[in-house]
Amino acid sequence: METRTKWIIDPAHSEITFKVKHLMITNVRGQFKEFEATIYTIGDDFLTADIDFRINPESVDTGNADRDIHLKSPDFFDVDQFREISFIGNSYEKVDLEGSYEMWGNLTIKGITKKIKLEVEFGGVITDPWGDKKAGFDISGKIHRKDWGLVWNSMMDGGGLLLSDEVWISCSVELKKSKTEDVLESSDISITKVNN
């Protein structure tokens, strides 16, 4: 049997952002303001992490109210019908000895689930001044929005599309270790560790 450690995301010290090309010459950036995550590890080994991450798509914020309303509409996130974006991660590969990893998991948007790969930079684990153990990560990746039914676009008069198909994801995440630990049977472990 192994000790299973629970970690929770600290939303006050985390951010979930994205950017997309606009007019093919610049980037429009946005963020999600409401999200939560539960992560379980074997001991403090994040290469064993079992991640359940959830975002409220209605919390999208690009700094423009009209654009945010459009993003919440059926053209994009359709928040009246689909109340959650989720990511389930449980497969990892160590890239180097400096804290770089690749992470695979299932991203679900608008009821469509696709496997994606994300790049992870592990910042380390420390104990803060209040005695809480914290872990930090920077996570990045790129997805094709049409794979999840986010297909709206507009043709410009001079040719070309208003928005790119590619969306760049960037997250800074701070986790807090729970005060309680669970005992996990070895048969319950479903984590994939590659080249670790």
Image (cartoon, rainbow, N blue to C red):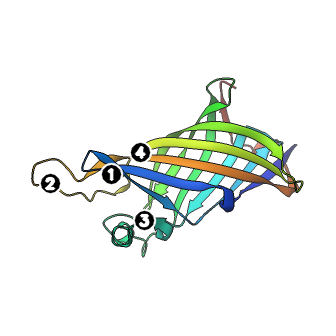
**Residue matched to label 1:** 146
Amino acid beneath label 4: Ile
Query: For mark 3, what is the residue?
Result: 63
| Amino acid at circle 2 | Met
Q: Residue at x 53, y 67 (%)?
A: 56
Alpha carbons under labels 2 and 1: distance apart: 19 Å
Residue 83, can we see it? no
The disc, 3 or 4, on the residue closer to the chain's N-terminal end is 3
Give the residue pinned by disc 4. Answer: 143
Residue at image position (26%, 45%) is: 24
Query: Residue 160 location, x and y as percent?
Result: 16, 47
Circle 3 SS class? loop
Choose the circle earlier in sequence order: 4 or 2: 4
Please indicate whether residue 168 sits to the left or right of residue 1 in the image: left
Q: Secondary structure at mark 4?
A: strand
C-alpha span from label 3 to label 4: 22 Å
Labelled pair 3, 1 in contact (Cβ < 8 Å): no
Residue 131: x %, y % from top left: 89, 54
Label 2, on which residue?
A: 156
Mark 2 in CB contact with mark 1 (< 8 angstroms) = no
Quadrant of the drawing holding the N terminus: top right
